[in-house]
Amino acid sequence: MSTIHVLSDALVNKIAAGEVIERPASVVKELLENSLDAGASWLRIDVEDGGRKLIRVTDDGVGMSSSDLAMCVQSHATSKITSEDDLFAISTMGFRGEALPSIASVAQMRVVSRPKDQDAGHEITVTGGRSEPARAAAAPPGTCVEVRNLFFNVPARRKFIRGANTEYGHIVDQLAKVALAHPAVGFELTHNRRTMYHLEPTESLTGRIGNFYGRELADSLLSVSSQRSELSVSGFVAPPVLARSAAKWQFSFLNGRFVRDRFVQHAVKEAFRGLVDPAKYPVAFLYLRLDPRGYDVNVHPTKIEVRWQDSNLVHSAVLAALRDVLLRSDLTPALETTVAEDDPSRVRSQQVREAIADFFKRSEPAQRRMEFTPPTSKPARPAPPRPEPSLSRSASLPPTDVSVTAPLRETRSAAPPEAPRAIQIHNTYLVAETPEGVVIIDQHALHERIMYQQLSERIMEGNLETQRLLLPEPVAVTPRQKALLTEHTDLLKRLGVEVSSFGPGTAAVQAFPSLLNHADAPEFVRALLDKLSEKGHTAHPENLLQEMVEMMACKAAVKAGDPLTGGEIEDLIAQRDLVEKSSSCPHGRPTALKLTLRDLEKQFKRV
């Protein structure tokens, strides 16, 4: 007796439904896409009980005749492709012919439609995959699809549907993705007969973003626009300070279709590297336009994944577009002028505000203002000898070594711009006057960014300058760590670090980067070994190098608590305008906060 048999059509449709229909929001997505393909300019979505009881999507599209109505609930029945060649140039949202039959197999469905050029409409009902003949019905031009009691005949699936509020939230998420991709189309969403969203057709993408994610975010967005080869990239990104803890705030649209693509996501991450905390995700709304022959969406039943013909083009185009806007924009975050009562930072914030007020009250000449250092609650520790006015923290370095006063790029002027009036407060922050108000600078974070860029540029030209130690510095190492030192000899050489074996369980630091001559060499090597152990063999050499440079920049930069002279303050602030991504340190922390005159006037009750 044969054990292989052909599955029934009903079971095949239920399996297909399992791939396409996960929850009520999946139904909304499929129906909205069908309506858009039908040329709809206005869509109404009515939902009851989070979509568990009812989902109704009504459009003003081209509509269907009675014969098309009967065909649309058949498996793989579609008007969107006719030949194999069409699969390689998909220009519609849907094309598989699976949506309606899949939904109908697990719900009670009614479809009413009327073509614009006909006087009468027709309707068809399908329950659990069994359809009734189409019959005449009164209907306006367009199509209405009504889905009730989703998964009524698949209890195992129905029990995984969450509460009404949760499912409604997923429906809103789907509506947002469709509405953001098609701003020229109007949408209305009701839940339990209450209008929740009424979106008029618009040309303003930021307006649509504000409808779903708030005007504050929409008003802060930076515009992106780029064309590379046949691929165009446009849209918006939020400043680094608005990065979120989840990747769901990154929206990518390809020819009007929401997609989630690892190449685009990686490009966004790379563009914001060093501007946001690595654990956070930038907010982005990106719109890609490309000839349909350049990609394939026939990869996953939900059509959310893409296979690119040239993935390198996509990655480089998105990365270049984002880097361009980030480099052209002032990313300095604004200082919060209100502090919650239970905010643990309120004491420090109050000190900063008092220092700002003190800054503007002072009437001493600019030179005296530069030299002023406010008293602190603890005596300032003596500063190590350092050259004036360099902040390199390396008194013994030859003139060619890296310092913040060295020109950063040959294309830039070697003479830094004139530094604004500034003071140091609490041996940690610099308060400087700007034409718009004041800027409060974290001296360590800014100097770390400066050192990181200069170190990176030096490494691109060759190995870092090294300095042999008079006495080798011993470091206790495990056998695994000793193996790592041998394995990454080339990396250490590029960083200007030389470490050799010094007997069982010990290695010796023989040479160290000149820039870090005040740093603890064994401590740095131990931190370096910890990072190498954490990354393992899978880490890309360039990524490892970048992380090591970040560590070196942190070690070389001035620290919080270091008193600075007036000349050093001038140099540090002057260099701020000469480095890229100066608004944040390599780890994503802000280097400065700005406070406008308008904000100050509000604080002092002048307005």
Image (spheres, rainbow, N blue to C red):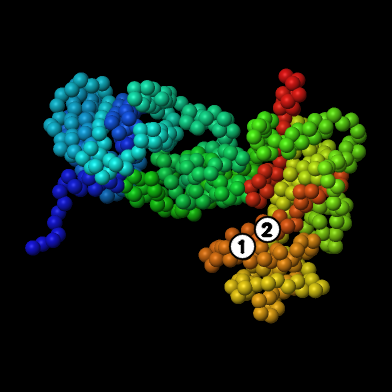
Residue appearing at x 78%, y 71% in the figure: 468
Secondary element at tag 1: helix
Name the residue type under label 2. Met
Vertical comparison of 243 with 193: above or below: below
Q: Residue 146: percent from the left, percent from the top?
A: 26, 30
Residue with the mark numbered 1? 531
Q: Earlier in the sequence, mark 1 or mark 2?
A: 1
Secondary element at tag 2: helix
Name the residue type under label 1. Lys
Q: Which label is found at residue 551?
A: 2
Q: Residue 395: percent from the left, percent from the top?
A: 85, 59
Q: In 3D space, how far apart are the residues under numbered discs 1 and 2 (Cα atoms)?
A: 10 Å
Residue appearing at x 16%, y 46% in the figure: 9
> Looking at this view, is 528 or 184 the one in front?
528
Vertical comparison of 21 with 188: above or below: below
Q: Which label is found at residue 586?
A: none
Crowdedness near tag 1: few (<14), some (14–19) or many (≥20) residues, C-alpha within 10 Å: some
Crowdedness near tag 2: few (<14), some (14–19) or many (≥20) residues, C-alpha within 10 Å: some
Residue appearing at x 32%, y 47% in the figure: 301
Left or right: 250 with respect to 394? left
Left or right: 220 with respect to 476? left
Q: Do the residues labelled 1 and 2 touch (CB within 8 Å)?
A: yes
Which of the 4 quarters of the picture holds residue 92?
top left
Residue appearing at x 16%, y 51% in the figure: 7
Q: Can residue 493 be seen in this view?
A: yes
Q: Residue 416: percent from the left, percent from the top?
A: 80, 46
